[in-house]
Image: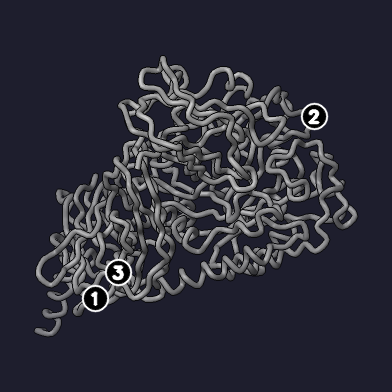
Amino acid sequence: MKQLLFVLTFQLLSIIGFTQQVKAPAPYGTLPGENQVQWQKMEYYMFIHFGPNTFTDKEWGHGDEDPKVFNPTQLDAGQWARTAKAAGMKGIIITAKHHDGFCLWPSKYSTHTVRESAWKNGKGDVLRELSDACRKYGLKFGVYLSPWDRNHPAYGTPEYNTVFANTLTEVLSNYGPVFEQWFDGANGEGPNGKRQVYDWPLFHQTVYRNQPKAVIFSDVGPGCRWVGNENGFAGTTNWSTLNTAGFEPGQKAPSTKVLNQGDEDGKSWVPTEADVSIRPGWFYSAATDDKVKSINHLLNIYYGSVGRNANLLLNVPVDRRGLIHANDSIRLMEFRKVLDQTFANNLAKGTKVAASNVRGGAKQFAANNLADGNYESYWSTDDAVTEASLTIDLAKETAINRIVLQEYIPLGQRVKSFAVEYWDGKKFRELDRQTTIGYKRILTFPVIKTSKVRVNILESKACPVIAEVQLYKAPELLSLPQISRNREGKVSIQSESPDAVVRYTTDGSEPTFSSSHYTQPFDFGSGGIVKAKAFINNGAKASETVSNTYDQASQKWSVAGSDKDKRLDRMIDGDARTFWMSAQSNETSQRPIIIDLGEKLTLKGFSYVPRQDGNTGGIIYQYSFSTSEDRINWTRVVNNAAFANIKNNPVKQDVLFERSYAARFIKLEVLSTVNENDQQITVAEIGVITR
């Protein structure tokens, strides 16, 4: 009898305990769909631009190319899939139809397809081969179909929307599951281009009818959105929510800033996808075989996309043989190796994690969930607690240089700001302070040694729900620092590697590991020489020294006429990557370039920087140069001179005078350019020499 009473009492207590179980946090705000959550977990996949443009060496074809130009005699979609798989990618999206209208499958709704090409005597189907290869190698398959069609005769008429919807159905119903449908918003760009009023609701209905689990990409989703640039970088603040009402893909899209950062309280869940090419262009060109992005550059893109709550869509163009070029595949394997080495060992896994608050004191929401390597378990606080701290105890001093944080997004994106601190043996020091987290946030920094890391949730829109906090020691990579100065005279020093510690000097001496540590831009308006060197492994390994010599900053300067044309300021903005372009060369010769220095200076010479974009159009060859104190009386300092060999070697030109001149105004008269037929003049920078 006593035993039965004990059993009944135990069962009753168990029932009471179960009914008192702490409830999970209520979902907050706009939420992702299950397909969007699974899409976000893919993180990194391949874009392939391939078509007639590959053979005509164009980025945007006109639709009038002979389809027989498309003839990849060694096409191997299996090689593409193997490469993507080996690179750690989760899928492939291919340009099934670009703006030229050429279809990589034998569409019955077009006469500009592989059926009319020379490839396989018109019997080939690129989509069939790639979708089969993706299935074979365990990759997801996605398609890009541009609604713009520069070949189809119906484009620009109401009939075309039906044609395009039929084209979508053809692709989405014949090649198996499609994880993402990529829509470009281009619409008749260019002079006299035909415009089309796109029926987006029809297009979306067509996608969902054929592929209900597909995520639709465009400037405004509805599945995921463009990042607002083609550099691969999401905003340091990046909300997955967006206000889409009143917007459309293309010219009616939200601003690039909004696309890059999202809307904090957006009504739709439209996370960011960052698209970028491994080369300067989207389609293959032999001219870019030596311009594949470096490992450091790709890592920066990865941390600026996946590490900022976005997915990374990396374009790897197929060449004219129908293969991924060796330069691209080798770089992808090198990139994969560094990523594997970086994230192989989560130093926080299995450690003790303490929290300032645990939801209801329940084990199911305990801080140790952050260190179990399981995204589906999470830590959370009581509903009223929106500020909290987490402390990871590593038990011993440990070297780290990467931190990964993840919110549990099925319950919404909540964190608005956070900071990370590390224990230096005596106290906690702030390491970084950022805004949003989202699905994944990766912080990068030079190596520190610490036994404890503390994450402070500074502001959250509801009780924070954090799935993971991970710590890593990535292999340290070295890269040359880059020195620049803006118009205000502030010097910035950047390194492509987040691992490098940059040291610098301004007295002409060689930088050492004990020299000034660069952490933020510094004033250098009066000029001089800046030398910098990057160090890794606690100073054991260093880059070569980089140096830049500066003269008077142009903060006080103005170009005559710039009040009417702000583009004139590009020649004095301190940025050689930008340049001013005149209307016509003869017009500029009659109206020389006059600059007000804002104060009287003693000039020993002047400098001219030609455009740095690889083109020679408008580069000045012959010139005259004058100075003045009052802009009325001018002294011709250099008469009918020339920048020797500037066409073949377009670098900064320093011209020293025979003696010094006091001047407030300078005048550059252009007599000729390096090309006889130039109709315009270009100037990247004009400077003065006073030192």
Question: What residue do we see at 68% from left, 43% from top?
Answer: 59
- In the image, 57: left or right of 222? right
Q: Secondary structure at mark 1?
A: loop
Query: Do the CB atoms of the residues marked 1 and 2 lie less than 8 Å apart?
Result: no
Give whichever of discs 3 and 2 has the lower sequence position: 2
Q: Secondary structure at mark 3?
A: strand
Tell me which corner region of the image, top left, top right, bottom left or bottom right, holds residue 380.
bottom left
Q: CA distance from mark 3 to mark 2?
A: 60 Å
Please provide percent x and percent y for residue 566. 45, 24
- In the image, 221: left or right of 358? right
Q: Residue at label 2?
A: 153
In the picture, which quadrant includes the C terminus?
top left
Give whichever of discs 1 and 2 has the lower sequence position: 2
Disc 1 packing (10 Å; few <14; some 14–19; many ≥20): some
Disc 2 packing (10 Å; few <14; some 14–19; many ≥20): few
Residue type beneath disc 3: Val
In the picture, which quadrant includes the N terminus?
bottom left
Residue 468 seen:
no
Please provide percent x and percent y for residue 101. 74, 39
Question: What residue do we see at 24% from left, 62% from top?
Answer: 379
Nearest the eye: 598 or 431? 598
Q: Mark number for residue 447?
A: 3
Residue type beneath disc 1: Thr
Give whichever of discs 1 and 3 has the lower sequence position: 1
Nearest the eye: 294 or 502? 502
Q: Residue at label 1?
A: 351
Please provide percent x and percent y for residue 189. 65, 29
Please provide percent x and percent y for residue 44. 51, 59
Nearest the eye: 218 or 323? 323
Residue type beneath disc 2: Pro
Query: Do the CB atoms of the residues marked 3 and 2 lie less than 8 Å apart?
Result: no
- In the image, 398: left or right of 680? left
